[in-house]
Image (cartoon, rainbow, N blue to C red):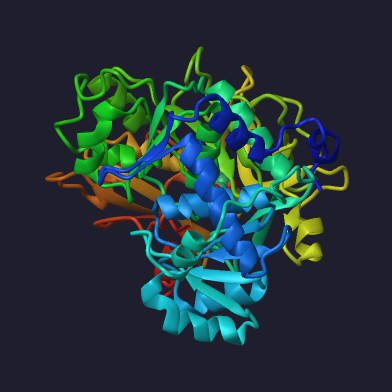
Amino acid sequence: MGVNSQTIASSIIDPTDWVEYAARKHPHRSFLRTPAGRQLSYEALHEQSARLASALMRRGVACGDRVAARVEKSPEAVLLYVACLRMGAVFVPINVASSPNEVDYLLRDSSPRIAIVPPGERAVLAALADRAGIQCVETLGADGEGSLSELTRLCDPERKSMGPHDAGSPAAIVYTSGTTGQSKGAILTRANLASNATVLAEAWRFTGQDVLMHTLPLFHIHGLFAAINTVLASASSILLLPKFELHSALKHMSEVTVFMGVPTHYTRLLQDRGLNREATAHMRLFVSGSAPLLIETHQEFLRRTGHVILERYGMTETLINASNPYDGPRVPGSVGPPLPGIAVRVTNRDSGAVEHKSDVIGTLEIAGPNVFAGYWRDAEKTSAEFTADGWFKTGDLARIDRNGYLHIAGRVKDLVISGGCNVYPREVESELDALPGVAESAVFGAPHPDFGEGVTAVIVPEAGAVLLEAQIIESLSARLARYKVPKRVLLVAELPRNAMGKVQKSALRATYACLYRAS
Ligand code: AMP
């Protein structure tokens, strides 16, 4: 259990209050619209989410029950999330791209009262749901069709059971990306969601005038909570796009004021000449997170648009922890200081002792009202991820500089230990990325007969660049201590990434597992 979550929970407003408040104060203000012409005012959000809640209740869903949603990104999916929030059901988003095996695991593990799936997948998924002991399966399509929508049309809006709810009760279970082993369900409470959105709306200066371009998926905390909840908490508005697509993002940029993206969105935007000062003239804020933003991307974006990207740092278990300031220096390569009310500390990776000196890399730990309530049905894993004094071990390596800004050095499990020396991949990647002709890079450890692990790099060359392994190694030798210089540098067309744009280092380790095998 996070240190402050219980004490702060009682003083936080509940997420349902956002909807109630905005519907009362700004009934005609747009909550969401799509380029296809779908519009939802705050009044409509209030009414339609209550109707949907009523339909869920008719299907036996009660406060505290889990609702598994494998639904295409759409206004319907957003309404379903808001309906769950308002009635106190626990939203369990499932990636529409997950395989039947993964769905099987997620359904069994979360054991929801109801599973909601796309109309075209009913036959396949109903069989899985049946095997997982789920009695109720309904369909919901991106176009608003499906059995749940039909039922919703017959229902009156639910008025009772829409709160108040206990701040400490679960609002969602979000499965971690599970790059190693089985993914785990992180239980996020209503207080977690409420506190984080309130802090973000304030930190990023959201007002009712803002329109957020939403291109992120809805099964991850970035698109679901950092984006939607921050809009709800500030009664601002969303332009909902089905996904990030370069031309559509540029085309609609003049209709919005804020963009939230992952670093790959920014590198793709930079590939288009249409990204310039005019195209972004009335934008107020560009936010990046979920993976490290290259310093080069940050600088190039500023040069092309005049906008300084605001980088922030978060994770499924804690929502957003740190953010570069709205006013004040946004430092490239840093994720900024912790957000108000959130405490961070760096501890020694081996001894666990708290590092009091600045700029020492160690394991990052977090405490605050944003920290999740634990892993679903896994008390052992939960207690393993918290320290004895209640701090959550993020699994990230970081340093805090003398101005209190956090610098993420990568995942603990991605640390390379070569010949007994620690090599932080991020440091080597920064040097590689700064070399002419290198578009991006990833550094990881591959088993090595002499060194235990050999520092290994893959790089993606810029279009038309001719790069030679020996030259790259030589250039790095002038910049880095010898043990940090990659033993091999391999050229690749692209880096393996997941849906959130995170480089999958475990995939690289698997691909190059035999690179240094003694021949
Ligand atoms: P997830 O739980 O899928 O959101 O992944 C969270 C992880 O993404 C964090 O623990 C970090 O390793 C990484 N991450 C998120 N934001 C950033 C960032 N701005 N810079 C570097 N790593 C980040």
Q: Residue at x 20, y 29 (%)?
A: 275
x, y percentage for residue 64?
73, 59
Q: Residue at x 72, y 63 (%)?
A: 376
x, y percentage for residue 492?
27, 57
Determine whether, in the image, residue 167 is placed left or right of residue 249: right
Q: Residue at x 45, y 70 (%)?
A: 147
x, y percentage for residue 260?
41, 36
Q: Residue at x 62, y 45 (%)?
A: 396
In the image, residue 410 sits, relative to residue 70, either above or below, namely above
Q: Would you say residue 403 is visible in this rendering?
A: yes
Q: Between 315 and 255, which is closer to the camera in this rendering?
A: 255
Residue 383 occupies which quadrant of the picture? bottom right
Q: Residue furthest left?
A: 464
Determine whether, in the image, residue 251 is placed left or right of residue 216: left
In the image, residue 350 sits, relative to residue 303, either above or below, namely below
Picture mark count: 0
Image quarter of the C terminus: bottom left
Determine whether, in the image, residue 452 is placed left or right of residue 109: left
x, y percentage for residue 224?
51, 47
Q: Would you say residue 409 is visible in this rendering?
A: no
Q: Between 89 and 223, which is closer to the camera in this rendering?
A: 89
Residue 430 occupies which quadrant of the picture? top left
Determine whether, in the image, residue 439 is placed left or right of residue 344: left
Q: Between 157 and 77, which is closer to the camera in this rendering?
A: 157
Residue 398 occupies which quadrant of the picture? top right
Q: Between 37 and 490, which is closer to the camera in this rendering?
A: 37
